[in-house]
């Protein structure tokens, strides 16, 4: 079955530590995204990538880093510079929008919940 | 002011009720409108997708867009306990643009 796999599902981090969240997709989508979800705030875009070896900052990129070395993979590192990292992190992917394909609808993974101790 | 506003609820209704979920937005340039459903501890899944104004129906679900009022709605008929989830509206200006999400409305359908 095609889909997006995020791991780990739950992660605990001590203050000052970097952690990396994994995101893998087998949908052959070109674009991948990382969102952060906090209660009452909806989804906020952290980083996105439309092509391998290229990515752009979203609305809340400070304290996060990403890489896109393979089309299928888009890992997110939460660094010690992120002051309030406890949240639910969602990875998504989509086709790149074209006039023929229409708007690029997102497919989401099941999420990773990060808790800072 | 947020670009997209959504009443966070929670909203609790009895089984069989008609549910109305709503979002308002400030920028008239939005053209693509979506509703996502998110079960607890899961990722969102696309429920409805509408381009520009009008209604779209899919089974018990109807999405409505009123661009003149900058208002979108999702109606659920004959609501079921399995509809209990958080519903997120989302919209974008153009095909390749960034998707802007509402805060999400938590819905509980009681048997």
Image (cartoon, helix red, strand yellow):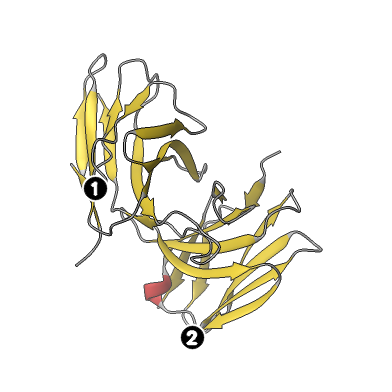
Q: Chain of mark 2?
A: B
Dot 2, how many residues are within 10 Å of its Cα: few (below 14), some (14-19), or many (20+)?
Answer: few
> For mark 2, what is the residue?
B59
Label 1, label 2: how far apart the Cα atoms are: 34 Å
Dot 1, how many residues are within 10 Å of its Cα: few (below 14), some (14-19), or many (20+)?
Answer: some
> Seen in the image, is B103 located left or right of residue B67?
left
> Seen in the image, is B1 located left or right of residue B75?
right
**Mark 2, secondary structure of its residue:** loop
Residue B67 visible somewhere in the drawing? yes
> For mark 1, what is the residue?
A72
Q: Quadrant of residue A19?
A: top left
Up/down of B14 relative to B44, above or below = below
Dots 1 and 2 on the same chain: no
Q: Chain of mark 1?
A: A
- Quarter of the image with the C terminus of chain B in it: bottom left
Q: Quadrant of residue A75?
A: top left
Residue A34 visible somewhere in the drawing? no
Name the disc covering residue B84, or none: none
> Seen in the image, is A50 located left or right of residue B9?
left
Residue A97 placed where, x, y %? 49, 56
Q: Residue at x 48, y 39 (%)?
A: A44
- Quarter of the image with the N terminus of chain B in it: top right
Q: Residue at x 31, y 55 (%)?
A: B42
Up/down of B69 relative to A64, above or below = below
Q: Residue at x 69, y 69 (%)?
A: B65
**Mark 1, secondary structure of its residue:** loop
């Amino acid at each position: 079955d095609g889909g997006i796999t995020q791991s780990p599902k739950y992660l605990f981090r001590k203050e000052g530590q970097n952690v990396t969240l994994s995101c893998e997709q087998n949908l052959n989508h070109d674009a991948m995204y990382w969102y952060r979800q906090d209660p009452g705030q909806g989804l906020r875009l952290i980083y996105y990538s439309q092509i391998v070896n290229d990515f752009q900052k979203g609305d809340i990129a400070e304290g996060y880093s990403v890489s896109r070395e393979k089309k299928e993979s888009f890992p997110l590192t939460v660094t010690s510079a992120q002051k309030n990292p406890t949240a639910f992190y969602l990875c998504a992917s989509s086709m790149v929008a074209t006039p023929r394909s229409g708007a690029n609808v997102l497919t989401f993974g099941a999420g990773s919940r990060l808790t800072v101790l | 002011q947020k670009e997209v506003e959504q009443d966070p609820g929670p909203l609790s209704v009895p089984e069989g009720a008609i549910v109305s979920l709503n979002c308002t937005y400030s920028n008239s340039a939005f053209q693509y409108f979506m509703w996502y459903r998110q079960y607890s501890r899961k990722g969102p899944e696309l429920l409805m997708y509408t381009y520009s104004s009008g209604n779209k129906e899919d089974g018990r679900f109807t999405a409505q867009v009123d661009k003149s009022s900058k208002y979108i709605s999702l109606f659920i008929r004959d609501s079921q306990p399995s509809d209990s989830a958080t519903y997120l509206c989302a919209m974008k200006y153009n095909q390749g643009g960034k998707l802007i999400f509402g805060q999400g409305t938590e819905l509980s359908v009681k048997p």
